[in-house]
Image (tube, rainbow, N blue to C red):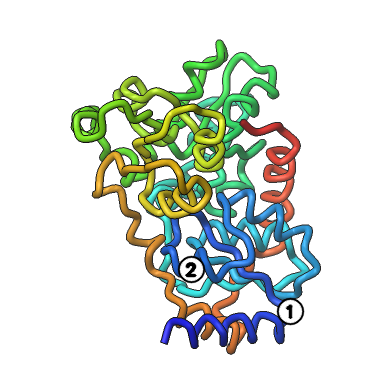
Amino acid sequence: MTDTLVKEIRRLAAEKQAIILAHNYQPPEIQEVADLTGDSLELAIRASKTDARVIVFCGVHFMAETGATLCPDKRVLLPNPNAGCAMADMLTADELREAKAALPGVPVVTYVNSTAEVKAESDICCTSANAVQVVKSLGTPEVLMVPDRNLALWTQRHTSQKIHHLEGYCPVHDNLTAAAVAEARRAHPGAVVMAHPECPPEVIDAADVVRSTSGMLAYPGESDAGAFIVATETGLLHPLAKRYPQKRFYPASADMVCADMKLTTLADVRRALETGEPAVTVPEPVRVKALRAVERMIAVPRD
């Protein structure tokens, strides 16, 4: 059945002039059927440069919104409309406006893991790969970072600028503990611990290196180590093992699973290609403002 679905998906993608994008946290079978895999910004940028007419974004809602923001001339499909993001839902545009009013003149740096409405209220966006560089690029004594407090706290370690933050977080990363990391080290002696900046400070302190998902995918190629403990969503284990078959990768915790990231199925992808639904759009006034913040982010180098 799976082979039949994959063949149908590939046929439909060619027929509809579609490109299929899958985030690194998606189920393995979704990653395998995709034309491109990567982190959310990476995929959106590459999609904006394609001549495909349709973008099938296998991820969560804010990712498809970012694609629609960058690619207004393309039809952007989110195969499973129930795939959301708890962290993105933790901050509304009204709440950000209230925070801005309390810090007049302080620029807003918004994590790409946010809604288009929140991006539209921001000065510049960032990813976990370029948050430090984005903050430093502003050259201001203070910034407000939203919605992820852990990314803000990690960024604060690497800049002298004062960083204000709100209390949003990714439940998958925020629930990881230093005790769980220590347990993983005992189970896999000598393995290098790679942690995502969305992890809480005590986990950052317990890690050997801190990298974005794209950074984690690159790091084993730069390291002589043969084993790695991966402190991010377990979906990243698939592309890591595929890229470095001679090395071993272990989850920091088997509980690091994003249920929303696992919602998309091959049947969903086929249905989206067949029907052209569900499509994700961003109202033009919001899109134009959000685009400005996203484009400023893209211009800043990543790790």
Q: Nearer the viewer, residue 210 or 72?
A: 210
- Taking the image as shown, residue 191 lies to the left or right of residue 131, namely left
Who's the residue at 61% across and 44% down the image? 121
Q: Nearer the viewer, residue 185 or 245?
A: 245
Tally of numbered tags: 2
- Look at the numbered disc 1 and give the secondary structure of its residue: loop
Residue behind mark 2: 30
Across and down, in percent, residue 33 comes to: 55, 71
How many residues crowd mark 2 within 10 Å: few (<14), some (14–19), many (20+)?
many
- Residue at left offset 54%, top offset 32%: 101
Q: Is residue 109 left or right of residue 70?
A: left
- State the residue position of label 1: 17
Question: Residue 46: which quarter of the image?
Answer: bottom right
What x and y, as percent, mark residue 93? 52, 48
Q: Can residue 89 be seen? A: yes
Say which residue appears at 29% left-offset and 23% top-offset: 202
Dot placed on the residue nearer the N-terminal end, 1 or 2: 1
Please name the residue shown 62% across and 69% down the image: 20
Between the C-alphas of marks 1 and 2, the distance is: 19 Å
The amino acid at mark 1 is Gln
Going by the numbered disc 2, the residue's amino acid type is Ile
| One can see residue 149 in this view | no
Q: In the rendered image, which quarter contains the C terminus?
A: top right
Q: Position of residue 227 (x, y in %)?
A: 37, 35
- Against 286, residue 147 (above or below) is above
